[in-house]
Amino acid sequence: MATVFVIFGATGDLSKKRIFPALFKLSKNNLLPEKFKIIACARTKHTSQEFREYLLENLEIEDKSTFTNFSKLIDYLSLDIAEDINLSNLSKAIDNFEKQANSCPQKIFYMAVSPQILKKSFENLGKNGLHISCKTHTNTPRIIIEKPFGSNLKSAQDINSTLQKYFSEEQIYRIDHYLGKETVQNIFAFRFANEIFEPVWNNKYIDHVQITTSEYIGVEKRGEYYDKTGALRDIVQNHLIQLMTLVTMEAPKSFNAAQIKNKKLEIIKKIKKLTPLEVENSTVRGQYDGYLGEEKINPTSQTESYALVKLGIQNNRWDGVPFYLRTGKKLTGKVTSIIIQFKEKGHKIPNHITIQIQPNEGIGIELAAKKPGLATELEPVDMEFCYKTSFDSDQPEAYERLLVDVILGDQSLFLSQEIIEESWRIIDPIEKVWQSGKPKLATYKPGTWGPIEAEDLIGKDGRKWLQPLLTICKI
């Protein structure tokens, strides 16, 4: 089907670093529809040719001839969606493409814009009739929304209320790019296609789970946004809770969008909401030395660049198993991992499984084995499965997979409004207590794994941090 892909915020970092590279790779691999048009929209004054040259300068492209073919798909329009300036030109451009394709195109709108202007943007799309499908077919336009999905439950509901005046839930694609990563996809296969794990995937055998997303960089150019948001709302509310649901959800009857979302919703509703006293005793908020000197940061800011939350799930499978979710900037390295720690059975060498999502995707299992020699001594040994060395085919980047799914109309890897609202119901009580100054804001040195208070929290439970394997699958 002919498809027109409209990107609002086409000159921003998200478009430059994620969206256009993904579209370029899909075009290079002949994975886009035969009749495909990209309309890049932003306030900056560019001609279409100037914008194509801007992309060529900013994308990492070795073979410029392949980019020439891709660039022919792109037109640029200078407009302001929030202020409804020149949106009529977008309608005309879509009509022109319809005539060229001799077909009514599937419209896809990518909202790569500031969250502050989303509501006005939705209203102006509706005001200009861009949310209406062609008369000649029933394929309704699709709209892609990036996080953050609000800053709390109320704002998330408010944004959605405006959005759903013009788009139904079936038309809305809420992106969490972590869900497009290959190892995240493989959690389903690992859990549900390997029968050896299912019998021990429960509180009888699993002691606890550690879910980590760390970055070695600071806030960089995102100071204005980050200082109003913090690590808890920026990462824990979406990425980490989503990873938690994938590890713990029950097997769906079939792996379609509705079934997957229902199973994720079931588990997220069972995550216990923390009381104010539990927030004080089961969370850590920290700020790296030097944060207050970063660009566009309030010099008296109490915003956390590190967040640790201990959560639990109130159901038969997981009752009593703590989940430690932590994230931070200026830590030891860039890594996202899930570590499932099994209970000790007398040999004092606990087994654990590491599902590593980045930087090098793979799965590691630590086992106990007999050390060579006459004496019977056990030592931990590692087994690794690495994507790069196990398969001949290239791994698609997360955005490549997600954009293909939008084009195909598959919502399996996208978030529902219900899931977003349930996530905020977990985070809002924590944020409220943190805003009151409890627990005290800790500090930590860049290049470490965070504040000492994080060590104390897990230590008082009789446990210790299992450091993410920065060297797993390192080639």
Image (tube, grey):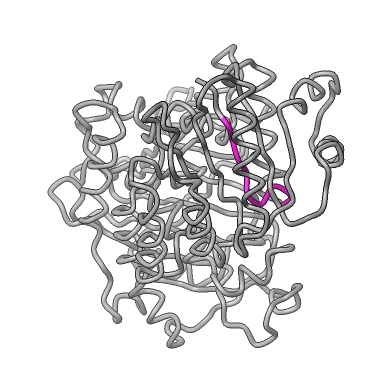
Residue furthest to the left in view is 316
Is any atom of residue 377 visible in this view? no
Where residue 221 sits in the image (x, y, percent)? 74, 63
Q: Is residue 245 left or right of residue 229?
A: left
The residue under the point 82% across, 53% down is 45
Is any atom of residue 296 visible in this view? yes
Q: Nearer the viewer, residue 65 or 95?
A: 95
Where residue 63 sits in the image (x, y, percent)? 84, 21
Where residue 78 sits in the image (x, y, percent)? 74, 51
Q: Quadrant of residue 97?
A: top right
Q: Quadrant of residue 427?
A: bottom left
Vertical arrangement, residue 38 with respect to residue 321, above or below: above
Is 369 covered by the magenta stretch? Answer: no
Residue furthest to the top in view is 392
Vertical arrangement, residue 358 with respect to residue 432, above or below: above
Vertical arrangement, residue 89 with respect to residue 61, above or below: below
Vertical arrangement, residue 140 with respect to residue 156, above or below: above
Q: Nearer the viewer, residue 4 or 352?
A: 4
Q: Nearer the viewer, residue 240 or 440?
A: 240
Q: Over which residues does the magenta segment extend?
A: 4-12
**Which image quarter is the C terminus in?**
top right
Q: Is residue 439 left or right of residue 39?
A: left
Is 7 covered by the magenta stretch? Answer: yes
The residue under the point 27% across, 29% down is 197
Count how many numbered circles sit on residues in the image.
0
Q: Nearer the viewer, residue 399 or 44?
A: 44
The residue under the point 62% across, 72% down is 444
Q: Quadrant of residue 224?
A: bottom right
Where residue 19 sits in the image (x, y, percent)? 64, 39
The residue under the point 29% across, 27% down is 255
